[in-house]
Image: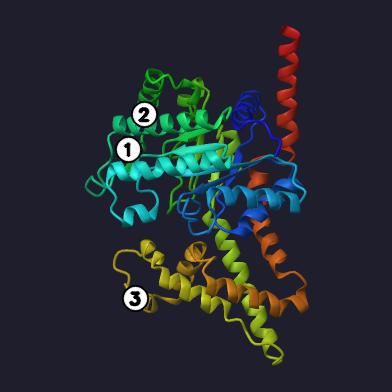
Protein backbone atom coordinates (compact mmCIF):
# COMPACT_ATOMS: atom_id res chain seq x y z
CA UNK A 1 0.00 0.00 0.00
CA UNK A 2 1.65 3.24 -1.15
CA UNK A 3 1.57 5.75 1.66
CA UNK A 4 3.71 8.40 3.32
CA UNK A 5 5.76 7.31 6.32
CA UNK A 6 3.78 7.81 9.50
CA UNK A 7 6.56 9.90 11.00
CA UNK A 8 6.32 12.32 8.07
CA UNK A 9 2.52 12.34 8.25
CA UNK A 10 2.54 13.33 11.92
CA UNK A 11 5.14 16.00 11.23
CA UNK A 12 2.80 17.42 8.61
CA UNK A 13 -0.11 17.33 11.07
CA UNK A 14 2.02 19.30 13.54
CA UNK A 15 2.96 21.85 10.86
CA UNK A 16 -0.68 22.30 9.86
CA UNK A 17 -1.67 22.83 13.48
CA UNK A 18 1.07 25.42 13.90
CA UNK A 19 -0.14 27.18 10.74
CA UNK A 20 -3.75 27.37 11.94
CA UNK A 21 -5.20 24.37 10.08
CA UNK A 22 -5.72 21.94 12.97
CA UNK A 23 -6.65 18.30 12.61
CA UNK A 24 -6.25 15.19 14.76
CA UNK A 25 -5.50 11.70 13.47
CA UNK A 26 -7.95 8.93 14.34
CA UNK A 27 -6.74 5.53 15.51
CA UNK A 28 -9.42 2.84 15.41
CA UNK A 29 -8.91 -0.21 17.60
CA UNK A 30 -9.66 -3.18 15.29
CA UNK A 31 -11.46 -5.33 17.85
CA UNK A 32 -13.48 -7.14 15.19
CA UNK A 33 -13.52 -7.78 11.47
CA UNK A 34 -16.62 -5.62 11.10
CA UNK A 35 -14.96 -2.66 12.85
CA UNK A 36 -11.87 -3.03 10.67
CA UNK A 37 -14.02 -3.10 7.54
CA UNK A 38 -16.11 -0.12 8.63
CA UNK A 39 -13.02 1.99 9.31
CA UNK A 40 -11.51 1.15 5.92
CA UNK A 41 -14.81 1.96 4.25
CA UNK A 42 -14.83 5.35 5.98
CA UNK A 43 -11.19 6.00 5.07
CA UNK A 44 -12.03 5.31 1.42
CA UNK A 45 -15.09 7.51 1.11
CA UNK A 46 -13.83 10.37 3.29
CA UNK A 47 -10.30 10.50 1.86
CA UNK A 48 -8.69 10.35 5.27
CA UNK A 49 -5.64 8.48 6.56
CA UNK A 50 -6.57 5.90 9.18
CA UNK A 51 -4.53 4.37 11.99
CA UNK A 52 -5.42 0.98 13.48
CA UNK A 53 -4.21 0.45 17.05
CA UNK A 54 -4.31 -3.26 17.96
CA UNK A 55 -3.47 -4.46 21.46
CA UNK A 56 -1.70 -7.74 22.16
CA UNK A 57 -4.99 -9.03 23.54
CA UNK A 58 -6.59 -8.40 20.15
CA UNK A 59 -3.80 -9.37 17.74
CA UNK A 60 -0.70 -11.34 18.65
CA UNK A 61 1.39 -14.36 17.79
CA UNK A 62 -1.26 -16.61 19.36
CA UNK A 63 -4.05 -14.94 17.38
CA UNK A 64 -5.52 -12.91 20.25
CA UNK A 65 -9.27 -12.73 20.60
CA UNK A 66 -9.67 -11.64 16.97
CA UNK A 67 -7.84 -14.85 15.87
CA UNK A 68 -5.42 -12.70 13.83
CA UNK A 69 -1.67 -12.93 14.05
CA UNK A 70 0.05 -9.64 13.12
CA UNK A 71 0.65 -10.93 9.59
CA UNK A 72 -2.97 -12.08 9.19
CA UNK A 73 -4.22 -8.75 10.53
CA UNK A 74 -2.22 -6.79 7.95
CA UNK A 75 -3.25 -9.17 5.17
CA UNK A 76 -6.92 -8.78 6.13
CA UNK A 77 -6.51 -4.99 6.13
CA UNK A 78 -5.10 -5.14 2.60
CA UNK A 79 -7.93 -7.37 1.35
CA UNK A 80 -10.60 -5.08 2.79
CA UNK A 81 -8.83 -2.08 1.25
CA UNK A 82 -9.11 -3.80 -2.13
CA UNK A 83 -12.77 -4.64 -1.51
CA UNK A 84 -13.64 -1.00 -0.85
CA UNK A 85 -11.21 0.52 -3.37
CA UNK A 86 -9.45 2.36 -0.58
CA UNK A 87 -6.53 4.52 -1.73
CA UNK A 88 -6.24 6.36 1.57
CA UNK A 89 -3.16 5.43 3.63
CA UNK A 90 -3.85 2.79 6.28
CA UNK A 91 -1.42 2.29 9.16
CA UNK A 92 -1.37 -0.93 11.23
CA UNK A 93 -0.13 -0.08 14.73
CA UNK A 94 0.57 -1.80 18.03
CA UNK A 95 -1.24 -0.47 21.09
CA UNK A 96 0.11 -0.97 24.64
CA UNK A 97 3.15 -3.12 23.96
CA UNK A 98 4.52 -3.81 27.41
CA UNK A 99 4.90 -6.48 30.10
CA UNK A 100 1.71 -7.83 31.66
CA UNK A 101 -0.52 -5.77 29.36
CA UNK A 102 -1.61 -8.98 27.64
CA UNK A 103 -4.18 -10.65 29.88
CA UNK A 104 -2.67 -14.10 29.35
CA UNK A 105 0.69 -12.91 30.67
CA UNK A 106 -0.87 -11.41 33.76
CA UNK A 107 -2.97 -14.53 34.35
CA UNK A 108 0.13 -16.73 34.04
CA UNK A 109 1.98 -14.58 36.63
CA UNK A 110 5.02 -14.21 34.40
CA UNK A 111 8.13 -12.74 35.94
CA UNK A 112 9.60 -9.50 34.61
CA UNK A 113 12.24 -11.09 32.40
CA UNK A 114 9.79 -13.57 30.91
CA UNK A 115 7.12 -10.89 30.37
CA UNK A 116 9.62 -8.56 28.69
CA UNK A 117 10.84 -11.46 26.56
CA UNK A 118 7.32 -12.21 25.36
CA UNK A 119 6.76 -8.56 24.47
CA UNK A 120 10.01 -8.48 22.51
CA UNK A 121 8.91 -11.52 20.47
CA UNK A 122 5.63 -9.75 19.72
CA UNK A 123 7.45 -6.56 18.69
CA UNK A 124 9.46 -8.65 16.24
CA UNK A 125 6.29 -10.21 14.84
CA UNK A 126 4.72 -6.76 14.41
CA UNK A 127 7.74 -5.50 12.50
CA UNK A 128 7.83 -8.60 10.31
CA UNK A 129 4.15 -8.05 9.49
CA UNK A 130 4.74 -4.44 8.42
CA UNK A 131 3.40 -2.40 11.34
CA UNK A 132 3.99 1.34 11.01
CA UNK A 133 3.90 2.26 14.71
CA UNK A 134 4.77 0.53 17.97
CA UNK A 135 3.34 1.79 21.25
CA UNK A 136 5.98 0.98 23.88
CA UNK A 137 4.27 0.90 27.26
CA UNK A 138 6.19 -0.71 30.17
CA UNK A 139 4.18 1.19 32.79
CA UNK A 140 2.74 -1.84 34.59
CA UNK A 141 4.73 -3.84 37.13
CA UNK A 142 2.89 -6.69 38.81
CA UNK A 143 5.71 -7.11 41.33
CA UNK A 144 4.61 -3.88 43.03
CA UNK A 145 1.83 -3.51 45.56
CA UNK A 146 -1.60 -2.81 44.09
CA UNK A 147 -1.91 0.89 43.19
CA UNK A 148 1.79 1.61 43.74
CA UNK A 149 3.16 3.61 40.79
CA UNK A 150 6.23 2.42 38.97
CA UNK A 151 9.15 4.83 39.27
CA UNK A 152 9.31 7.13 36.25
CA UNK A 153 13.01 6.41 35.83
CA UNK A 154 12.30 2.69 35.59
CA UNK A 155 9.56 3.36 33.04
CA UNK A 156 12.07 5.27 30.92
CA UNK A 157 14.71 2.53 31.24
CA UNK A 158 12.31 -0.24 30.20
CA UNK A 159 10.95 1.91 27.37
CA UNK A 160 14.47 2.28 25.99
CA UNK A 161 15.12 -1.46 26.40
CA UNK A 162 12.10 -2.32 24.27
CA UNK A 163 12.85 0.38 21.69
CA UNK A 164 16.43 -0.86 21.45
CA UNK A 165 15.15 -4.35 20.69
CA UNK A 166 12.70 -3.04 18.10
CA UNK A 167 15.40 -0.96 16.40
CA UNK A 168 17.73 -3.96 16.28
CA UNK A 169 14.95 -6.00 14.67
CA UNK A 170 14.14 -3.19 12.25
CA UNK A 171 17.74 -3.19 11.10
CA UNK A 172 17.79 -6.98 10.81
CA UNK A 173 14.68 -6.90 8.64
CA UNK A 174 16.03 -4.11 6.44
CA UNK A 175 13.14 -1.76 7.24
CA UNK A 176 13.76 1.92 6.58
CA UNK A 177 11.77 3.24 9.51
CA UNK A 178 9.12 2.58 12.13
CA UNK A 179 7.40 5.15 14.31
CA UNK A 180 7.05 4.97 18.09
CA UNK A 181 4.49 5.99 20.67
CA UNK A 182 5.30 5.97 24.39
CA UNK A 183 3.66 6.62 27.72
CA UNK A 184 0.26 5.95 29.16
CA UNK A 185 -2.67 7.81 30.63
CA UNK A 186 -3.04 5.32 33.47
CA UNK A 187 -2.37 6.62 36.99
CA UNK A 188 -0.52 3.37 37.81
CA UNK A 189 2.02 4.32 35.18
CA UNK A 190 3.19 7.24 37.28
CA UNK A 191 2.82 9.74 34.42
CA UNK A 192 -0.54 11.26 35.27
CA UNK A 193 0.63 14.67 36.48
CA UNK A 194 2.60 17.38 34.68
CA UNK A 195 5.73 17.00 36.79
CA UNK A 196 5.99 13.23 36.29
CA UNK A 197 5.09 13.55 32.64
CA UNK A 198 7.81 16.11 31.96
CA UNK A 199 10.36 14.14 33.97
CA UNK A 200 9.58 11.05 31.88
CA UNK A 201 10.10 12.99 28.65
CA UNK A 202 13.44 14.37 29.84
CA UNK A 203 14.67 11.00 31.11
CA UNK A 204 13.58 9.23 27.94
CA UNK A 205 15.35 11.75 25.75
CA UNK A 206 18.55 11.42 27.77
CA UNK A 207 18.44 7.61 27.72
CA UNK A 208 17.76 7.41 23.98
CA UNK A 209 20.68 9.74 23.32
CA UNK A 210 22.98 7.65 25.52
CA UNK A 211 21.99 4.51 23.57
CA UNK A 212 22.39 6.27 20.20
CA UNK A 213 18.68 5.83 19.51
CA UNK A 214 17.52 9.36 18.82
CA UNK A 215 16.25 8.25 15.41
CA UNK A 216 13.58 6.39 17.40
CA UNK A 217 12.28 9.48 19.22
CA UNK A 218 8.49 8.96 19.52
CA UNK A 219 6.04 10.78 17.30
CA UNK A 220 3.30 10.37 19.94
CA UNK A 221 3.44 10.61 23.70
CA UNK A 222 0.26 9.51 25.46
CA UNK A 223 -1.21 12.03 27.86
CA UNK A 224 -4.00 12.00 30.41
CA UNK A 225 -6.33 14.61 28.95
CA UNK A 226 -9.37 14.28 31.19
CA UNK A 227 -10.92 11.12 29.77
CA UNK A 228 -10.71 7.63 31.24
CA UNK A 229 -12.92 4.57 31.65
CA UNK A 230 -15.41 6.53 33.75
CA UNK A 231 -15.18 10.11 32.40
CA UNK A 232 -15.91 11.41 28.90
CA UNK A 233 -15.03 15.11 29.10
CA UNK A 234 -11.87 16.10 27.27
CA UNK A 235 -9.81 18.85 28.96
CA UNK A 236 -8.37 21.17 26.26
CA UNK A 237 -6.27 23.19 28.71
CA UNK A 238 -4.48 20.10 29.99
CA UNK A 239 -4.00 18.88 26.42
CA UNK A 240 -2.49 22.20 25.34
CA UNK A 241 -0.10 22.23 28.29
CA UNK A 242 1.05 18.67 27.58
CA UNK A 243 1.54 19.58 23.93
CA UNK A 244 3.73 22.51 24.93
CA UNK A 245 6.01 20.07 26.75
CA UNK A 246 6.50 17.65 23.84
CA UNK A 247 6.15 19.87 20.76
CA UNK A 248 9.67 21.36 21.03
CA UNK A 249 10.96 17.80 20.59
CA UNK A 250 8.84 17.21 17.49
CA UNK A 251 6.23 15.01 19.19
CA UNK A 252 2.48 15.34 19.59
CA UNK A 253 0.10 14.19 22.33
CA UNK A 254 -2.06 11.12 21.74
CA UNK A 255 -5.21 10.51 23.74
CA UNK A 256 -6.64 7.15 24.70
CA UNK A 257 -10.10 6.57 26.19
CA UNK A 258 -11.69 8.74 23.52
CA UNK A 259 -14.80 6.55 23.35
CA UNK A 260 -18.09 8.44 23.77
CA UNK A 261 -16.14 11.64 24.48
CA UNK A 262 -18.45 14.62 24.98
CA UNK A 263 -16.44 17.21 23.05
CA UNK A 264 -14.36 15.53 20.29
CA UNK A 265 -14.46 18.67 18.13
CA UNK A 266 -12.08 20.35 20.61
CA UNK A 267 -9.25 17.87 19.98
CA UNK A 268 -7.87 19.58 16.85
CA UNK A 269 -8.07 23.07 18.34
CA UNK A 270 -6.11 21.84 21.37
CA UNK A 271 -3.30 20.49 19.23
CA UNK A 272 -3.97 16.80 19.88
CA UNK A 273 -2.00 14.69 17.41
CA UNK A 274 -4.11 11.57 17.63
CA UNK A 275 -6.81 9.74 19.55
CA UNK A 276 -7.70 6.07 20.01
CA UNK A 277 -11.30 4.84 19.87
CA UNK A 278 -12.29 1.20 20.30
CA UNK A 279 -14.93 -0.04 22.76
CA UNK A 280 -17.47 2.43 21.37
CA UNK A 281 -17.38 0.81 17.95
CA UNK A 282 -17.76 -2.74 19.23
CA UNK A 283 -20.70 -1.52 21.33
CA UNK A 284 -22.31 -0.18 18.15
CA UNK A 285 -21.72 -3.56 16.54
CA UNK A 286 -23.33 -5.40 19.46
CA UNK A 287 -26.30 -3.03 19.58
CA UNK A 288 -26.81 -3.34 15.82
CA UNK A 289 -26.82 -7.13 16.05
CA UNK A 290 -29.28 -6.97 18.90
CA UNK A 291 -31.58 -4.88 16.69
CA UNK A 292 -31.26 -7.49 13.94
CA UNK A 293 -32.12 -10.17 16.49
CA UNK A 294 -35.31 -8.26 17.29
CA UNK A 295 -36.11 -8.08 13.57
CA UNK A 296 -35.58 -11.83 13.37
CA UNK A 297 -37.89 -12.48 16.32
CA UNK A 298 -40.65 -10.51 14.60
CA UNK A 299 -40.03 -12.35 11.34
CA UNK A 300 -40.19 -15.71 13.11
CA UNK A 301 -43.82 -15.09 14.09
CA UNK A 302 -44.77 -16.16 10.59
CA UNK A 303 -43.25 -19.55 11.30
CA UNK A 304 -41.13 -19.45 8.15
CA UNK A 305 -37.75 -19.44 9.93
CA UNK A 306 -36.07 -20.98 12.95
CA UNK A 307 -34.62 -18.19 15.12
CA UNK A 308 -30.84 -18.11 15.46
CA UNK A 309 -30.96 -17.13 19.15
CA UNK A 310 -27.94 -14.98 18.40
CA UNK A 311 -28.18 -12.67 21.39
CA UNK A 312 -28.57 -15.63 23.72
CA UNK A 313 -25.42 -17.18 22.22
CA UNK A 314 -23.53 -13.89 22.58
CA UNK A 315 -24.60 -13.52 26.21
CA UNK A 316 -23.60 -17.10 27.04
CA UNK A 317 -20.17 -16.61 25.45
CA UNK A 318 -19.52 -13.35 27.33
CA UNK A 319 -20.54 -14.93 30.63
CA UNK A 320 -18.38 -18.00 30.00
CA UNK A 321 -15.38 -15.81 29.11
CA UNK A 322 -15.40 -14.35 32.64
CA UNK A 323 -14.12 -11.05 31.22
CA UNK A 324 -17.25 -9.22 32.36
CA UNK A 325 -15.99 -9.53 35.94
CA UNK A 326 -13.34 -6.83 35.43
CA UNK A 327 -16.09 -4.21 35.15
CA UNK A 328 -17.96 -5.22 38.31
CA UNK A 329 -18.42 -2.43 40.84
CA UNK A 330 -17.67 -2.96 44.54
CA UNK A 331 -20.66 -4.59 46.19
CA UNK A 332 -22.22 -5.94 42.99
CA UNK A 333 -23.24 -9.62 42.90
CA UNK A 334 -20.53 -12.00 41.73
CA UNK A 335 -23.11 -14.08 39.85
CA UNK A 336 -24.11 -12.70 36.44
CA UNK A 337 -27.76 -13.79 36.76
CA UNK A 338 -28.16 -11.78 39.97
CA UNK A 339 -27.21 -8.48 38.33
CA UNK A 340 -29.92 -6.05 37.21
CA UNK A 341 -31.14 -6.49 33.63
CA UNK A 342 -29.75 -3.19 32.38
CA UNK A 343 -26.41 -3.93 33.99
CA UNK A 344 -26.24 -7.36 32.33
CA UNK A 345 -26.96 -5.76 28.95
CA UNK A 346 -24.12 -3.27 29.44
CA UNK A 347 -21.69 -6.04 30.38
CA UNK A 348 -22.65 -8.11 27.33
CA UNK A 349 -22.31 -5.12 25.00
CA UNK A 350 -18.92 -4.18 26.49
CA UNK A 351 -17.61 -7.73 26.57
CA UNK A 352 -18.81 -8.71 23.10
CA UNK A 353 -15.47 -7.82 21.50
CA UNK A 354 -13.80 -10.69 23.34
CA UNK A 355 -16.10 -13.35 21.92
CA UNK A 356 -16.95 -12.37 18.32
CA UNK A 357 -14.79 -15.24 17.07
CA UNK A 358 -16.12 -17.91 19.46
CA UNK A 359 -17.50 -20.68 17.16
CA UNK A 360 -20.98 -20.69 18.72
CA UNK A 361 -21.26 -16.90 18.25
CA UNK A 362 -19.97 -17.08 14.67
CA UNK A 363 -22.46 -19.82 13.79
CA UNK A 364 -25.40 -18.00 15.41
CA UNK A 365 -24.46 -14.81 13.55
CA UNK A 366 -24.37 -16.65 10.24
CA UNK A 367 -27.83 -18.11 10.92
CA UNK A 368 -29.10 -14.65 11.86
CA UNK A 369 -27.82 -13.23 8.58
CA UNK A 370 -29.24 -16.17 6.60
CA UNK A 371 -32.67 -15.63 8.15
CA UNK A 372 -32.69 -11.89 7.40
CA UNK A 373 -31.04 -11.89 3.98
CA UNK A 374 -34.29 -12.57 2.06
CA UNK A 375 -35.93 -9.44 3.55
CA UNK A 376 -33.02 -7.01 3.87
CA UNK A 377 -30.44 -8.12 1.33
CA UNK A 378 -27.15 -7.57 3.16
CA UNK A 379 -27.43 -7.73 6.97
CA UNK A 380 -23.66 -7.70 7.39
CA UNK A 381 -23.37 -4.56 5.27
CA UNK A 382 -26.07 -2.95 7.39
CA UNK A 383 -24.07 -3.64 10.58
CA UNK A 384 -20.84 -2.36 9.01
CA UNK A 385 -22.59 0.83 7.91
CA UNK A 386 -23.88 1.45 11.43
CA UNK A 387 -20.32 1.20 12.75
CA UNK A 388 -19.06 3.39 9.88
CA UNK A 389 -21.52 6.12 10.87
CA UNK A 390 -20.10 6.12 14.40
CA UNK A 391 -16.54 6.31 13.05
CA UNK A 392 -17.49 9.19 10.75
CA UNK A 393 -18.57 11.22 13.77
CA UNK A 394 -14.91 11.30 14.83
CA UNK A 395 -13.65 11.89 11.30
CA UNK A 396 -15.84 14.96 11.15
CA UNK A 397 -14.96 16.19 14.67
CA UNK A 398 -11.24 15.73 14.01
CA UNK A 399 -11.48 17.65 10.69
CA UNK A 400 -10.21 14.72 8.69
CA UNK A 401 -12.56 14.77 5.69
CA UNK A 402 -10.42 15.21 2.59
CA UNK A 403 -7.24 15.37 4.67
CA UNK A 404 -5.29 12.94 2.46
CA UNK A 405 -5.00 15.59 -0.24
CA UNK A 406 -4.31 18.32 2.31
CA UNK A 407 -1.47 16.34 3.89
CA UNK A 408 -0.03 15.29 0.53
CA UNK A 409 -0.17 18.90 -0.69
CA UNK A 410 1.80 19.99 2.35
CA UNK A 411 4.47 17.37 1.72
CA UNK A 412 4.65 18.35 -1.95
CA UNK A 413 5.03 22.03 -1.08
CA UNK A 414 7.86 21.29 1.33
CA UNK A 415 9.60 19.13 -1.25
CA UNK A 416 9.24 21.91 -3.80
CA UNK A 417 10.66 24.49 -1.36
CA UNK A 418 13.57 22.20 -0.60
CA UNK A 419 14.27 21.80 -4.33
CA UNK A 420 14.22 25.57 -4.87
CA UNK A 421 16.39 26.25 -1.82
CA UNK A 422 18.84 23.58 -2.98
The answer to whether mark 2 and mark 1 are in CB contact below 8 A is yes
- Looking at the image, which is closer to me, 212 or 86? 212
Q: Earlier in the sequence, mark 2 or mark 3?
A: 2
Residue 30 visible in the displayed image: yes
Query: Can you tell which quarter of the image residue 9 is in?
Result: top right
Q: For the point 58% across and 52% down, which residue is it?
A: 72
- The residue at the far bottom in this view is 303
**Marks 1/3: CA distance?**
34 Å
Residue that badge 3 annotates:
335
Q: Secondary structure at mark 2?
A: helix
- In the rendered structure, the answer to whether residue 398 lies left or right of residue 118 reads right
- In the rendered structure, the answer to whether residue 108 lies left or right of residue 284 reads left
Q: Secondary structure at mark 3?
A: loop
- Looking at the image, which is closer to me, 157 or 351? 157
**Marks 2/3: CA distance?**
42 Å
Q: Name the quarter where the C terminus is drawn.
A: top right
Q: For residue 200, which numbered disc appears in the image? A: 2
Q: For residue 190, which numbered disc appears in the image? A: 1
Q: For the point 50% across and 38% down, which residue is it?
A: 134
Q: For the point 75% across and 54% down, which residue is it?
A: 83
The crowd level at tag 3 (other Cα within 10 Å; few <14, some 14-19, many 20+) is few
Amino acid sequence: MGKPELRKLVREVKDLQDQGTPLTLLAVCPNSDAVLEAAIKVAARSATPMLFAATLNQVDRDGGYTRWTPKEYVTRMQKLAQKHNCDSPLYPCLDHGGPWLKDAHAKANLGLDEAMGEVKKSLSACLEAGYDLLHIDPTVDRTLARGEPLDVGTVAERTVELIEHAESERTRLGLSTVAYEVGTEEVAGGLANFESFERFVVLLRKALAEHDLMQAWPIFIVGKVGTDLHTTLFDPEVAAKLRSIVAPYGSLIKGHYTDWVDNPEVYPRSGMGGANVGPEFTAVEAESLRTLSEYETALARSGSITPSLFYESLTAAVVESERWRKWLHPGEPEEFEKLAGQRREWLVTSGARYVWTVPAVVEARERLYDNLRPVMGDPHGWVVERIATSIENYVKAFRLFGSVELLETGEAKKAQRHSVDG
